[in-house]
Image (spheres, grey):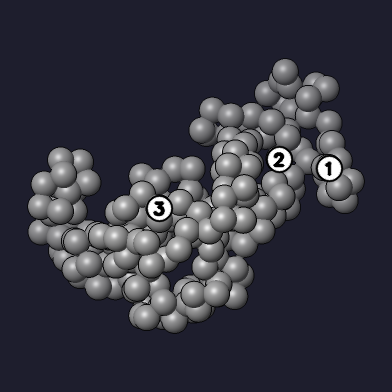
Amino acid sequence: MPDWFGNGPDTSPQPDRNGKTWDLFVASADGSAGYVPMSLPGTSALDISNAFAMVQSATPKLGHPVDPHSLTSKGADAYNILIKSMGVDPKDITIYQNDGDDFAAVLSRRGFDALVNSGKIQYHPGDAFLHYPYENGTRDKQENGSLHGVWLDPNVTDYVGGSGVYMQFHTDRNNPWEGGIQGMWDHLNCTFFKSGC
């Protein structure tokens, strides 16, 4: 193990798998430690490990995508908002997991750009916090029935060998950021106590 001054064999820079950049030993607040590429600042070894596991799990399913017409409930609501309100082309969405109330998908870079440039979403740290290992989150600005999306950092996905932006979507009856104190309370009641959903 390296000492507090960064001395020791574990701190020596290591070339990454492509031999193009240098990885440095990092100990992160999430308790993980390991070599992390300098091109991924703020990323922990655990983030990379989780992204790799997700890409490995999802890749076989991408060859047999879920038919969007099979989506029901909140999953169908989220998909309709994504294509009708956010302007994401259905051809840029590959759904690989459908849990009824939500779905997981890979958006092409073009589809992801359409979403983030729609002007209809806003970012809050709390939108990703409860959906780990996803690293980023956003939702639209609707007070009721808001689209909630979380995703893996595309740079991390590229590093572990995936392509596109790995995302999960659902709708929330109450938007905690737009409904004031009552909206926050109603959202928490639904999330933790399954009440008022």
What residue sits right under mark 3 in the picture? Answer: 98
- For the residue labelled by badge 1, is the local secondary structure a helix, a strand or a loop? loop
Calculate the distance from the C-alpha at mark 1 to the C-alpha at mark 3. Answer: 33 Å
Task: Give the residue type at disc 3.
Answer: Asn
Q: Given contact means CB atoms under 8 Å apart, are the residues at marks 2 and 1 in contact?
A: no
Residue for point 29% across, 67% down: 77
**Residue 36 got which mark?**
2
Task: Measuring from the top left, give residue 1's x and y in whole percent.
Answer: 72, 18
Task: Give the residue type at disc 2.
Answer: Val
Task: Measuring from the top left, give residue 99's x and y in whole percent.
Answer: 36, 49
Dot 2 or dot 1, earlier in sequence: 1
**Residue 17 got which mark?**
1
Is residue 70 visible in the rendered structure shown here?
Answer: yes
In-image side of 45 versus 194 (left or right): right
Is residue 121 visible in the rendered structure shown here?
Answer: no
- For the residue labelled by badge 3, is the local secondary structure a helix, a strand or a loop? strand
